[in-house]
Image (cartoon, rainbow, N blue to C red):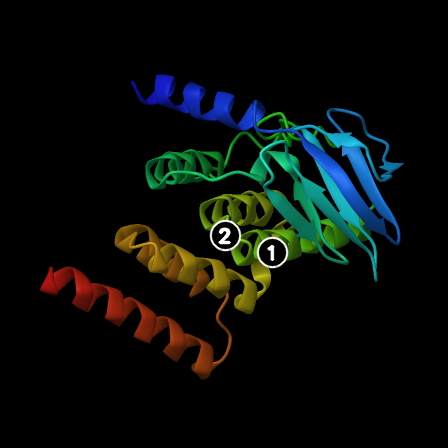
């Protein structure tokens, strides 16, 4: 049953609404489907659910779908078009469960599978490029949350933390998305996230923040 639900969830993502580019400022690129190369985006272009949008410094792109829903991706960011959609809380919980499964260590002799939900197939690239792209995706995920796509933002961030380990070492970014999970009322999931973040907490102040967050959620659970 869970497998069937996941297949249905993935199908919803893959067939998300296409977007038309309304305006472009600066250097904005798209990685289309499974192509390794990127190409510049122009006003009027149609972007599909398996496209990845990437903006350079001082650049932005304004998108709109046929229903009038719009999204602006600001500079130094990246986002998969498949995440420009509303998710139900149940879909998010299911997706987070699948992300947890993906974090389980596998045979080290095998090449990691970097394709997620058909969004992008990535070839090996220089380490610094990967780090920069990972941070751009985190920036994009934050903008998803700010634009009301909170559930999609959480999932996009979780995927990025897994695929780009360097991004997962940023305490502030990890805390930001864990707090989003908490604010959605996902108590067990938020405690799990806070416990994971505790492994990268370096200062007493950071440890105290996490301790207070966990204590607050536990008190809420007890009262309910």
The vertical placement of 208 against 110, above or below, is: below
Question: Residue 135 falls in which quadrant of the image?
Answer: bottom right
Q: Secondary structure at mark 2?
A: loop
Residue identified by numbered label 2: 148
Question: Residue 92 falls in which quadrant of the image?
Answer: top left
Q: Secondary structure at mark 1?
A: helix
- Which mark identifies residue 57? none
Residue identified by numbered label 1: 143
Query: Camera-side residue: 43 or 202?
Result: 43
Query: Camera-side residue: 67 or 34?
Result: 67
The number of numbered badges drawn on the structure is 2
Placement of the C terminus among the 4 image quadrants: bottom left
* Residue drawn where x is 54% and y is 58% of the image: 146
Residue 15, percent from left and from top: 57, 22
Residue 157, percent from left and from top: 55, 49
Query: Camera-side residue: 203 or 139?
Result: 139
Question: Residue 167 falls in which quadrant of the image?
Answer: bottom right
Query: Camera-side residue: 162 or 202?
Result: 162
* Residue drawn where x is 78% and y is 34% of the image: 31
Residue 106, percent from left and from top: 51, 32
The vertical placement of 4 against 39, above or below, is: above
Mark 1: few, some, or many residues within 10 Å (few <14, many ≥20)? Answer: many
């Amino acid at each position: 049953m869970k497998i069937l639900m996941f297949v249905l969830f993935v199908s919803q993502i893959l067939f998300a609404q296409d977007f038309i580019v309304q305006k472009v400022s600066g250097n904005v690129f798209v990685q289309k489907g499974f192509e390794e190369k990127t190409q510049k985006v122009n006003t009027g272009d149609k972007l599909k659910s398996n496209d990845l949008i990437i903006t350079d410094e001082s650049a932005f792109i304004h998108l709109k779908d046929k229903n009038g829903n719009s999204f602006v991706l600001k500079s130094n960011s990246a986002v998969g078009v498949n995440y420009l959609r509303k998710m139900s809380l149940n879909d998010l919980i299911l997706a987070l469960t699948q992300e947890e499964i993906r974090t389980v260590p596998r045979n080290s002799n095998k090449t990691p599978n970097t394709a997620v939900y058909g969004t992008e197939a990535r070839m090996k690239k220089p380490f610094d490029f990967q780090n920069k792209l990972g941070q751009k995706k985190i920036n994009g995920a934050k903008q998803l949350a700010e634009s009301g796509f909170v559930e999609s933002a959480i999932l996009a961030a979780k995927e990025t933390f897994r695929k780009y380990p360097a991004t997962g070492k940023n305490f502030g970014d990890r805390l930001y998305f864990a707090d989003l999970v908490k604010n959605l009322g996902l108590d067990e999931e938020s405690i799990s996230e806070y416990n994971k973040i505790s492994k990268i907490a370096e200062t007493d102040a950071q440890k105290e923040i996490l301790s207070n967050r966990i204590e607050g959620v536990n008190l809420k659970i007890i009262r309910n």
